[in-house]
Image: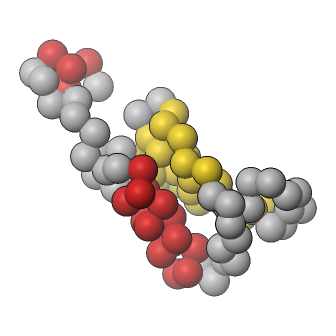
Amino acid sequence: MFLRRLFGKSKVLVTKEKAIQIAKSECEQRNWSWREPVKATMRFGNWEVRTNTQARGASARIIIDKYTGEVKKAGYLKR
C-alpha cells in the first residue's frame, strides 16, 4: 500500500458500481439470494458490499479488492 502511494499508483481501479456487479455475480455463482437495497463502502483498501441492508437476515457480505476486483471473502448470513 505504501509503495502505491509513493509511486502514484493508488488510483482506485474498481468503481462502486463495478464492485456491486462483481458481488452480484458472486452471489449468483454461489446460489445466494440477492436482495435490495445494497450498500457498498470502501474499507481498508477493499470494497465491502452488503445486500438486504434494511432487514435482518438473508444478507450477503462480499469483500472485493479495490485494485484487482478479486473477491477476497464472501459470507452469507441467513439470520
Q: Which residue in the rendered view is the most extreme toward the left?
A: 7
Task: Kindly identify the residue that appears in the image at 68 percent across and 60 percent down.
Answer: 37
> Quadrant of the image for the N terminus?
top left
In-image side of 41 versus 70 (left or right): right
In the picture, residue 12 is in which quadrant? top left
Whole-percent x, y for residue 9 in the image: 15, 30
Q: Residue at x 88, y 57 (%)?
A: 56
User: Relative to 25, is 68 above or below?
Assistant: above
User: Looking at the image, is 9 positioned above or below residue 40?
Assistant: above
- x%, y% of residue 6? 15, 16
Q: In this rendering, is residue 14 above or below 42?
A: below
Query: What residue sits 48% from the left and 75% below the top?
Result: 25
Relative horizontal placement of residue 11, taking residue 24 as reference (left or right): left
Is 61 placed left or right of 70 in the picture?
right
| Quadrant of the rendering where the C terminus is positioned | bottom right
Q: Position of residue 32 (x, y in %)?
A: 67, 77
Task: Give the colouring mode of the picture.
Answer: secondary structure
In percent of width and height, residue 59 lies at 75, 62
Q: Residue at x 65, y 73 (%)?
A: 34
* Number of residue marks: 0
Q: Is residue 50 left or right of residue 77?
A: left
